[in-house]
Amino acid sequence: MPNATKAALEESLKRLLLKKPLDKITITDLTTDCGISRMAFYYHFKDIYDLVEWSCVEDGAKALQGKKTSESWTEGLTQIFEAVLENKPFIMNVYRNADRERMENYLYKLTYDLIVGVVEEKSKGLDLTEEDKKFIANFYKYGFVGIMIEWIQAGMKEDIEELVNKMSLTLHDTVTTSVQNFQQDK
C-alpha cells in the first residue's frame, strides 16, 4: 500500500512540524515516528522536501476536485485558502524554513490548474491557440499567488471569504473579456 505509507509519512511530518522547524527534522525522525524503515521512505521520496511537495500537491488536488469552472472557481480558490489555513503550522514552517521558490512554484501549479480550466471553458469553440490560453492562465495565476503569498506572510489573519470575495469582484468577467480580446486580435 504505497499511498498508505506516503500518507503515514505526511502525517508524521505534520505532527513533527508542530514541535520543530523543517530544517531540524530528519528522515530518522520521520521513520521512527511512523514506524517504517528508512528504505521505505526512500522508496517513495528522494528527500524530505520531496515529501513536503507531495503533501502540498495532495492537499491541493483534494481542494480543487471539480472546482475548475467559471461557476465554481471561487469555491476552488476558497478551498485552496482553507487547505492552506487548515495546515497553517505546516505551511508556515515550510514557508519560513524551506526554499520559498519551491513553495511558490507549488502554488503557481495549483492555481494554474484552477485557472486553466476556466480559460478552457471560456474559449470553447473559439480560435485561440494553446499559447494564448496558457498566457491568459499564467497572467491570472501570478495575481492569485501574489495575494496568497501576502496572506501567508501576514500570518493568514485576513478572513478567507472576504479575501476571495475581493478577488472575485476584481476578476469578475475578466477571464471572459481576456479570451474575447485574444479572439478579436486574430
Image (cartoon, grey):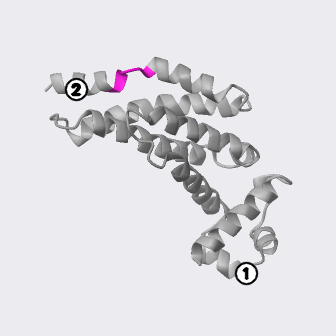
Relative to 132, 127 lies left or right: left
Task: Let me know if residue 172 is in the magenta part.
Answer: yes
State the CA–CA distance, disc 1 to disc 2.
Answer: 54 Å
> The disc labelled 1 sits on which kind of residue?
Ser
Relative to 57, 5 lies left or right: right
Relative to 9, 107 lies left or right: left
> Mark 2 falls on what kind of element?
helix
Percent from the top left, x then y, of residue 44?
Answer: 59, 73
Which residue corresponds to mark 2?
182
Percent from the top left, x then y, of residue 85?
Answer: 69, 40
Residue at the image position 43 percent from the left and 22 percent from the top: 171
Residue at the image position 20 percent from the left and 39 percent from the top: 129
In the picture, the disc for residue 37 is: 1
> The disc labelled 2 sits on which kind of residue?
Phe
Nearer to me, 155 or 95: 155
For the stretch drawn in magenta, the main secondary structure is: helix
Percent from the top left, x then y, of residue 162?
Answer: 61, 22
Image vertical order of residue 110 relative to residue 177, above or below:
below
Residue at the image position 65 percent from the left and 73 percent from the top: 5
Callout 2 environment at 10 Å: few (<14), some (14 to 19), or many (20+)? some
Residue at the image position 66 percent from the left and 79 percent from the top: 40
Q: What stretch of residues is rendered in magenta? A: 171-175
